[in-house]
Image: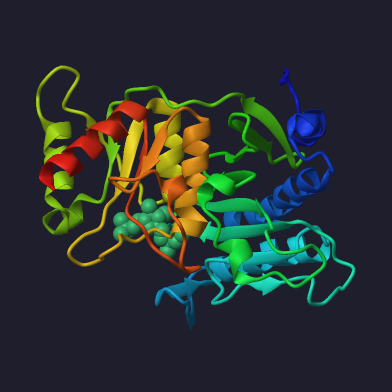
């Protein structure tokens, strides 16, 4: 149920009972993410004013330079979730290994683990382009009250109980699902409150936008090359429009509102593409499906992929259902 001028806090409380586990733990968890998002948003918005942007000089597990705001966002999300004692484990794209929270507190009976990409698209920060936070929530599979294990994090995406993102754009929005549709909330920065602005977000079945880094074209598999040519062909409602921000959250958000497809395929340079299954693809895939869209690696449903490692990468095609199915068709034909 949604109503006018509803705040995120009210929405969480009012919709708590629609969630199949009603302990309130998940609601507290989403509330903490909301809080951390506001803190990070405050810092992201100041990025041009203070000397916080730029590489920190460390290299993360993906072999990429970390920038100061990545480090800041990572710390804030981990701190907020740890201090409030509402999860038993956290895995972050910026951390080599997962963090077990119940190892410090034997009375920790929390059931949820969170996987997070604290600041996605961070190469865009220093040019004032939107960035985002992506989160994914699972119930642990090992016994409550014991330290979390790797298997609690290596669950298929179809086991997620909630997922969402924050986009720090022209407005800051928090968009999430607990498995009953997708709702978007916009931050009123003057009073620090998120309001329900986009109830029941859905992808249209067809779209007219394709988003892919065409600079990599020559390295793409033949099926993807053929699909891109199809998007550019003059026929019916084509050619489609090409839009690529280079910030997954923003590209996904735009495509969900306007109808479109996002592709990060494998290439001759990157055998599994670039995006991470656990921190980026699974949460976006759950949101896409909950919004009547689709997410695939070109052949298989993203949410059915069995993860084998925390920082696993996977090719990612996601968006309006008919567009994703067409791209899959091109992949199959080129096999
Ligand atoms: P990051 O997690 O290091 O920020 O990388 C993920 C980002 C996505 O947001 C974006 O869609 C993609 O990388 C862009 O990659 P490329 O610059 O290769 O097109
Ligand atoms: Mg990322």
Residue 104, compared with residue 173, is above or below; it is below
Residue visible at 52% across and 44% down in the picture: 169
Q: Is residue 228 visible?
A: no
> What is the quadrant of the N terminus in the image?
top right
Residue visible at 84% across and 43% down in the picture: 24
Identify the image's colour scheme: rainbow, by chain, secondary structure or one colour: rainbow
Q: Is residue 202 left or right of residue 105?
A: left
Horizontal and vertical percent for residue 217?
15, 53
Horizontal and vertical percent for residue 210?
27, 37
The quarter holding residue 187 reads top right
Residue 309, compared with residue 39, is above or below; it is below
Residue visible at 36% across and 58% down in the picture: 314
Horizontal and vertical percent for residue 206?
32, 23
Q: Is residue 57 visible?
A: yes
Horizontal and vertical percent for residue 242?
24, 37
Nearest the viewer among 118 and 224 is 224
């Amino acid at each position: 149920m949604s109503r006018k001028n509803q705040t995120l806090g009210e929405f969480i409380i009012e919709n708590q009972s629609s969630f199949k586990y009603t302990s309130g733990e998940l609601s507290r968890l989403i509330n903490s993410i909301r809080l951390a998002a506001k803190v990070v948003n405050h810092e992201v918005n100041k990025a041009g004013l203070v000397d916080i942007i730029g590489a920190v000089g460390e290299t993360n597990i993906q072999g990429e330079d970390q920038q100061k705001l990545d480090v800041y966002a990572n710390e804030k999300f981990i701190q907020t979730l740890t201090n409030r004692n509402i999860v038993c484990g956290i895995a972050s794209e910026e951390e080599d290994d997962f963090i077990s929270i119940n190892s410090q507190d034997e009375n920790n009976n929390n059931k949820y683990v969170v996987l997070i990409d604290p600041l996605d698209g961070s190469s865009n920060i220093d040019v004032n382009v939107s960035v985002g936070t992506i989160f994914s929530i699972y119930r642990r599979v090992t016994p409550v009250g014991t330290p979390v294990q790797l298997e609690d994090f290596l669950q298929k995406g179809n086991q997620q109980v909630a997922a969402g993102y924050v986009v720090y754009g022209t407005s800051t929005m928090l968009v999430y699902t607990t498995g009953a549709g997708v709702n978007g909330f916009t931050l009123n920065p003057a009073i620090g409150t998120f309001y329900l602005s986009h109830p029941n977000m859905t992808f249209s079945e067809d779209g007219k936008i394709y988003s892919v880094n065409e600079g990599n074209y020559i390295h793409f598999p033949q099926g993807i090359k053929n699909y891109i040519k199809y998007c550019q062909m003059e026929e019916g409602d084509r050619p489609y429009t090409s839009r690529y921000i280079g910030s997954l959250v923003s590209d996904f958000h735009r495509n969900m509102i306007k109808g479109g497809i996002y592709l990060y395929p494998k290439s001759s340079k990157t055998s599994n593409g670039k995006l991470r299954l656990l921190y980026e693809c699974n949460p976006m895939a759950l949101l896409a499906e909950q919004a009547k869209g689709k997410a695939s690696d070109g052949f298989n449903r993203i949410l059915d992929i069995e993860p084998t490692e925390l920082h696993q990468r996977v090719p990612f095609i996601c968006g309006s259902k008919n567009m994703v199915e067409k791209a899959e068709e091109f992949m199959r034909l080129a096999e």
